[in-house]
Image (tube, rainbow, N blue to C red):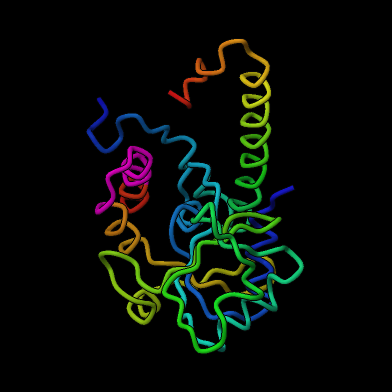
Amino acid sequence: MKNDLDKDIDLSVIQYNLSITPEERLINHQLAFETLQEILKAREELYAKSEHPTQDPARK
Amino acid sequence: MQNLNTLLKTLLENKIDFVLIGGYAAVLHGATQVTQDIDICAVLSEENLEKFRIALKDYDPRYRMNPNFKPSLLDYPPPNQKSENLYLTTTIGILDVLNKVHPVGDFQRINSKAVSVNLFGHLCKVISLDDLIEVKKSMTREKDKSILKELLNLKKN
């Protein structure tokens, strides 16, 4: 059973991060960052085209 | 394209004396969250300010906090005017430079416990895990609470 500290955390990802070098962590982070930027850009385009722009959950 | 690693490399290549803090430091310690900026702690002396200007001159560094006043770092502040913190946007990413980190302390204090990590051929000073945990404990955003959980887990490992 998970204790409070482990709740809501994917320990396998943390274990993986600890198995690689700090520089590799930053390189992986950059890839995730670029993906996130693409998602945010797509969201902006999606809601800019929508007839209901206020439906963007992030703008509520 | 924004590239936080290029931004970090630029600061390291220009031999600016700083300690990496915030979410990027958490990533270096092993946290899994994605952060969208680089936060560092540094003394904002005239000499250091000039180093920031030289390092960032090709990346259009601008103040970003006041929508009605976004001067270039290359022109502002004028000589002899002190700056406490820099909240900048550049073409390669967002950079915040703080001279103090609540509740831990100023650059000297953060620097005294910092750890050095080899990154991209340079030694980079990173806020200690214990100090970063203290900083995150003092923050109230959900994102910070989530990072705090990961940092506490990392301390256990």
The residue positioned 29% from the left and 64% from the top of the image is B102
Percent from the top left, x then y, of residue B142?
A: 33, 37
Examine the residues drawn in magenta and state their main secondary structure: helix
The residue positioned 58% from the left and 55% from the top of the image is B94
Nearest to the observer: residue B139 or residue A60? A60
The residue positioned 49% from the left and 56% from the top of the image is B65
- The answer to which quarter of the image holds residue B112 is bottom left
Question: Is residue B113 shown above or below B22?
Answer: below
- The answer to which quarter of the image holds residue A5 is top left
- The answer to which quarter of the image holds residue A60 is top left
Nearest to the observer: residue B131 or residue B57? B57
Percent from the top left, x then y, of residue B130?
A: 31, 62
Q: Is residue B67 magenta?
A: no
Percent from the top left, x then y, of residue B30?
A: 47, 50
Highlighted magenta segment, given as a residue range:
B137-150
Question: Is residue B139 shown above or below B116?
Answer: above
The residue positioned 69% from the left and 52% from the top of the image is B3
The number of callouts visible is 0
Farthest residue in the front direction?
A: B68
Percent from the top left, x then y, of residue B119?
A: 63, 66
